[in-house]
Amino acid sequence: MAGPDGRRAATVAVMNERLPALPEDWDRALAVVAHPDDIEYGTASAVARWTAQGKQVTYLLASRGEAGIDSMHPELAGPLRETEERAGAREVGVETVEFLDHRDGMIEYGIALRRDIARTVRRYQPEVIVTGAYGVRMVAGMTNQADHRAVGLAALDAARDAGNRWFFPELADEGLAPWGGVRYVCVAGGDQPTHGVDVTGEPLRRGIASLTAHAEYIKGLGAGGFEPGQFLTWAAGTGGQAMGVESAVLFDVHVLGFEGLPPWLAPDAAAG
Ligand SMILES: [Zn+2]
């Protein structure tokens, strides 16, 4: 998957400046992705670390990934992949997995998707949202997939939509109060990470178990015999170099709102 360019990027990062750790002074996160297995390609190891700390993490999937197995009709693949996603979630301490039933491969960025995500944000009131890269290019120069682009951008927007009482009045009619408490939107798989999560040891082991739970999907990948442990250990090792630890998952973190005083009110603002 990631080629020589990814290794070179990580080497450059370690030569310049190490990425800081993502703050962990929060209690609830919501992971929002397009398909079963999206969280498991790395992020799940960070989820394992967080749930071990007692944090509550909930998964929201825009589709059931029903078009993800070439040899299997979507009517069969959808329920199978849902089962594998729930099993993978349990490996990293996540009990609540919800599906929006947008159509796999055809997910559209737009008001309907933003509303559906905002509804879940209001219900679970997360302080952190984790999602996937929404650029055309992603980590190691790979080309991103259409559903991923739609869902990642919609998750970032819904983090704010959820806090506006005048957006989506139908949500208020459902009894869901605005939630403006999202502090960070953490984007996985981007080519410009800003923060890391140390997953050395047990979190990485549980993350590997989480991807391994997608057994039928991995079998469907066919030739080459993709091995989750080999891939995730390599990817986390590359991330670890950027952070100065053995294994890490990296995120491009959007901080929603200023932490402490905004820069123009800081004591040294006048001094420039
Ligand atoms: Zn995907």
Image: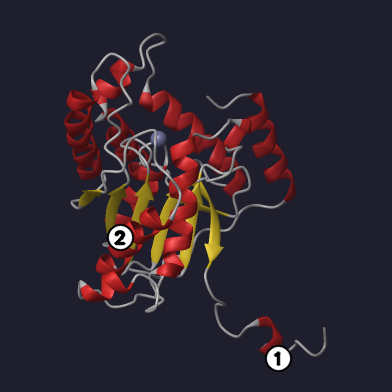
Task: Please provide percent x and percent y for residue 47.
Answer: 34, 50
Q: Is residue 207 left or right of residue 130?
A: left
Quadrant hosting ligand 1 = top left
Foreground: 162 or 94?
Answer: 162
Q: Position of residue 232 (x, y in %)?
A: 43, 32
Identify the residue at horizontal 70%, vertical 86% (top origin). Answer: 264
Q: Amino acid at mark 2?
A: Gln
Quarter-of-image position of residue 115: bottom left
Percent position (x, y) of residue 205? 33, 37
Q: Does residue 128 appear left or right of residue 60 in this picture?
A: right
Question: Considering depth in this image, is 117 or 180 the residue closer to the camera?
Answer: 117
Q: Residue at x 57, y 77 (%)?
A: 258
Q: Quadrant of the C terminus?
A: bottom right
Q: Quadrant of residue 162?
A: bottom left
Secondary element at image label 1: loop
Which residue is tagged 2?
Answer: 53
Q: Amino acid at mark 1?
A: Pro
Residue 248 visible: no
Name the residue located 54 percent from the left edge and 35 percent from the top edge: 144
Q: Is residue 267 visible?
A: yes
SS at circle 2: loop
What's the distance in space between the residues labelled 2 and 1, CA to CA? 35 Å
- Left or right? Give the position of 271 relative to 104: right
Q: Position of residue 160 (x, y in %)?
A: 45, 69
Q: Residue at x 41, y 76 (%)?
A: 164
Q: Give residue 267's mark.
A: 1
Vertical position of residue 10 compared to residue 260: above or below: above
Q: Earlier in the sequence, mark 2 or mark 1?
A: 2
According to the image, what is the colour scheme of the structure?
Answer: secondary structure
Neighbours of disc 2 within 10 Å: few (<14), some (14-19), many (20+): few
Rendered position, 122 above or below 8:
below
The residue mark sitting in front, 2 or 1, is 1
